[in-house]
Image (cartoon, rainbow, N blue to C red):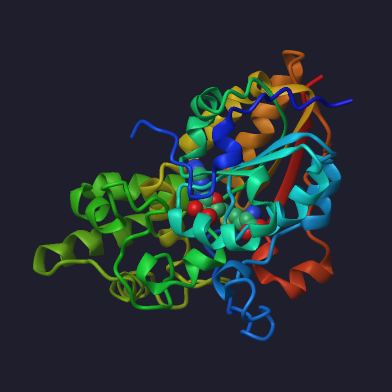
Amino acid sequence: MRHAECGMRNEIGAARGVFTVTDETSKEHSEFPGPPSDAQAGAGRIPNSALRHTPVLLREVLEWLAPKPNMTIVDCTMGGGGHSAAIVPRLMPDGRLIAMDCDEQALEAAKARLVEFAPKVAYVHRNFRDLPTVLAQLGCARIGGLLADLGMSSLQLDDPQRGFSFSREGPLDMRLDLRQPMTATSLIRQSSQRQLVDLFRDYGEERWAERIARRIVETRKRQPLDTTLQLARLVEEAVPRGASRRIHPATRIFQALRIAVNDELGALRELLSVLPDILAPGGRAAILTFHSLEDRLVKQAFRQGAQAGRLRVLTKKPVRPSAEEAAANPRSRSAKLRAAERP
Ligand SMILES: C[S@@+](CC[C@H](N)C(=O)[O-])C[C@H]1O[C@@H](n2cnc3c(N)ncnc32)[C@H](O)[C@@H]1O
């Protein structure tokens, strides 16, 4: 039996607003059409923005995470609240959901979706790398389960102002957390040619990293490089014509910049390193990744945890979406789900 050994303080029940606990490839970067229409989204009840993101591998996440009545579960990546909306009812009557996201807009959209469970949900506007601090501040010793569905949501990708999309004009921003100072524009401006090459190779596994970095450095001497389409066109021009591509030439460059701007791998490493300490005995972690860099980190951390006798790996192989899910939701195509349990 899994215990949610989490004696939450009162704040959690009172958390009506976003709770900012104080202190201050692969999916690669794939782009697919499509928010639902207002009719599909159930106009008038839940904001369309929250429903724009279809939760990936939802049935499988529920199966492996196995939320049960009275547990405390952390959703580290609330996004549109799709997974959480299915998890919270299973925690009733006395369970709790700690809903985290470093993007305040995502939390706000998801809040409307979970309005009927408001007293049972604590919304925390923080990076999941800070989870141990957040749990301590909530007076929560151990949790019954943890979900991390990595990367960005459709809400973010589809909003041109966020700068994640290479097919929509917008500022080259790419911050998940709008409180942080560094954007993709400032990263490009500050990096040397060598640093750009390394970044595109390490985080994008980009074959034409040298050519693209050189073109960026030449261009930025003449003009500011600060919009998405400007960068997408530059990459298209830098890559040799006829180079075989299954994906848009800018895909891997946008992925690499997004990973670097948000230090996505650093945050994931920190989260993985504390898993065995924050899970209650029998507590489970389910992690959804969308490119090989993330999946490798999860696989290694689970394996090391198992070797140390601190985790039990539940998924011998990563769980992948069915052909039906991949067809219905192209964004799910590169998803891999791994789950582990604290013995
Ligand atoms: C793929 S979406 C989650 C979608 C959600 N599971 C759903 O079903 O609607 C990923 C979310 O995680 C957030 N995120 C990514 N990295 C994060 C981090 N290190 N800390 C907190 N939130 C993060 C993003 O802002 C985004 O809203």
For the C terminus, the quadrant is top right
**Between 138 and 332, the one nearer to me in the picture:** 138
The x, y position of residue 211, in whole percent, is 31, 61
**Which residue does the image show at 46% across and 35% down from the upper left?**
266
Is 144 situated above or below 180? above
Which residue reaches farthest right?
1
Q: Please tell me in which quadrant of the rendered image residue 46 appears.
A: bottom right
Residue 36 visible within the image? yes
The x, y position of residue 322, in whole percent, is 83, 63
**Which residue does the image show at 28% across and 44% down from the upper left?**
195
**Which residue does the image show at 67% across and 86% down from the upper left?**
39
Q: Please tell me in which quadrant of the rendered image residue 120 appears.
A: top right
**Between 261 and 195, the one nearer to me in the picture:** 261
Q: Please tell me in which quadrant of the rendered image residue 53 appears.
A: bottom right
The x, y position of residue 107, in whole percent, is 52, 54
Which residue reaches farthest top?
308
The x, y position of residue 104, in whole percent, is 44, 54
**Which residue does the image show at 24% across and 64% down from the upper left?**
215
Is 54 situated above or below 183? below
**Between 270 and 43, the one nearer to me in the picture:** 43
Q: Is residue 175 left or right of residue 203?
A: left
Please tell me how many numbered marks the rendered image carries: 0
Residue 26 visible within the image? no
**Between 230 and 158, the one nearer to me in the picture:** 158
